[in-house]
Image: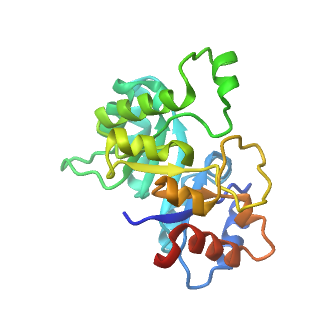
Amino acid sequence: MAKDVIIACDMPDRESVISFLGRFEGEKPWVKIGMELFYAAGPEIVREIKARGFRIFLDLKLCDIPNTVRGAMRSLRPLGVDIINLHAFGGAEMMRAALEGLTDENGERKTKLIAVTILTSTSEEALRRELLIEKPLAETCIAYAANAQAAGLDGVVCSPLESGVIHERCGAGFLTVTPGVRFAGGERGDQVRVTTPERARALGSDYIVMGRPITGAADPVAAWRRARAEFLGGEA
């Protein structure tokens, strides 16, 4: 997979997202469908967006007992999304069960599976005080990434700030999909560990996820093109 920008379409209903994507005309950006839209519009919105030619990262962050996650992934498999995720916190057995659910009867798996390490809204202080994890945040992310790789996953969701060290530990081919990206001078929103598209590229992110800086822009297409230009440089 080549590096690219994924637009987080965190919208409340089908009409909003279809209207938004209609502004891109012949362009086909990567789209992230998260819990808000999926719970409102159901699997059908995934099928519709996929049928329109968009590549999809289905961001549902599954985390449950292995058997439940295996079954959930089996149910989601026919949607044919390009990337799907779960929480690394669920453990290796759960991650292996998810892979089983995504694998068809012929032993083939078309969807890449990645694991969320630590949410980009979580600070070092919150990690210790609220989650009772005493290890440094970066060290925790690396450990979760290593667990995901050992379980057979394709990559992780992490902050751009951890991309480089995760690649050092897990190799260049292990994907890092990174939210927490804003244009220079932009609002942080509820993100804590943030950086710019250009800096994310330098840090080694494979994909960056941007929502409000693009979806909330006066000209979303121009904002998306700017994000790609800054992230991909001469490759855009």
Query: Which residue is located at x 43 percent, y 53 percent?
Result: 83
7 up-or-down from 26: above or below: above
Query: Which residue is located at x 63 percent, y 45 percent?
Result: 35
Q: Residue furthest left?
A: 106
Q: What colour scheme does the image use?
A: rainbow
Which residue is nearer to you in this view: 45 or 111? Answer: 111
177 up-or-down from 128: above or below: below
Q: Residue furthest bottom?
A: 26
Q: Can residue 7 be seen in this snapshot?
A: no
13 up-or-down from 24: above or below: above
Q: How many marks?
A: 0
Which residue is nearer to you in this view: 195 or 89? Answer: 195
Q: Can residue 34 be seen in this snapshot?
A: yes
- Residue 8: percent from left, percent from top: 63, 58
Left or right of 204 on screen, residue 172: left
Left or right of 172 on screen, residue 83: right
Left or right of 50 on screen, residue 106: left
What is the quadrant of residue 96 in the picture?
top left
Which residue is nearer to you in this view: 29 or 137? Answer: 137
- Residue 217: percent from left, percent from top: 78, 69
Query: Which residue is located at x 48 percent, y 71 percent?
Result: 51
- Residue 115: percent from left, percent from top: 45, 39
Which quadrant does the N terminus fall into?
A: bottom left
Left or right of 135 on screen, residue 226: right
- Residue 39: percent from left, percent from top: 64, 46
